[in-house]
Image (cartoon, grey):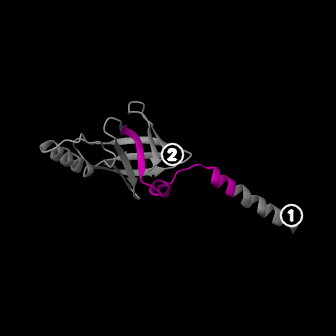
Amino acid sequence: MKKLALLGMTVLTVASLAACMSGNITSQDLQKNDWETDKKDESTGMKMMSSFTDNEMTFYFDTSEMETSNSSGLEALGEEFGKSLLENIKFEFDYTLEKNELTLKSDDEGLLDVDSAYTVKKDGKKIILTPVDSDQDGKIILTPAP
């Protein structure tokens, strides 16, 4: 009887360790945070952000740290209008996540016709998206937004 209990405990321990060490990223992991991408315009302070739902990834601009030129009159009005416009631009993509591969697709037949696949890897709190196809642009690093 003790051997059977010991065998049961061993099987449960091995199964738990295997589940913890699998490293697969889930949709829930992606939905936990809004994410700051590594695509930041250093000259303006504008950051590209992303967020996830069950099946949609959204890229948007964070202009909260965007620098203005302290202009007056029409220049200041133009800067505020531009900032307001950027805050309302969002790029939405359908995504699927199977094992550690994220596939982005858009239904847009125009400017943003996207069909891209990325391998997904966790590095501490960061999530790294590396293009599967070498013709795509470089990797995207997602860091939890403050």
Q: Are marks 1 and 2 in contact (CB under 8 Å)?
A: no
Q: Is residue 38 left or right of residue 63?
A: right
The residue sitting at the top extreme is: 135
What residue is shown at x 39% (from left), y 58% (from top)? 53
What residue is shown at x 13% (from left), y 45% (from top)? 73
The residue sitting at the bottom extreme is: 1
Looking at the rendered structure, the secondary structure element under dot 2 is: strand
Q: Is residue 139 magenta?
A: no
Q: Is residue 125 left or right of residue 21?
A: left
Residue count near mark 1 (Cα–Cα under 10 Å), binned few <14, some 14–19, many ≥20: few
What whole-number distance in Å separates the C-alpha atoms at marks 1 and 2? 43 Å
Q: Is residue 35 magenta?
A: yes
Say which of marks 1 and 2 sits in front: 2
Work out whether mark 1 precedes mark 2 in sequence or the reverse, and give the earlier one: 1
Residue 97 position in % (x across, y down): 46, 51
Residue range in magenta is: 16-40
Above or below 56: residue 101: above
- Residue placed under numbered mark 1 in the picture: 3
Amino acid type of the residue tagged 1 in the rendering = Lys
Residue 37 position in % (x across, y down): 41, 43
Q: Is residue 146 left or right of residue 61?
A: right
Amino acid type of the residue tagged 2 in the rendering = Lys
The residue sitting at the right extreme is: 2
- Residue placed under numbered mark 2 in the picture: 126
Rendered image quadrant of residue 66: top left
Looking at the rendered structure, the secondary structure element under dot 1 is: helix
Q: Nearer the viewer, residue 145 or 101?
A: 145
Q: Nearer the viewer, residue 24 or 72?
A: 72
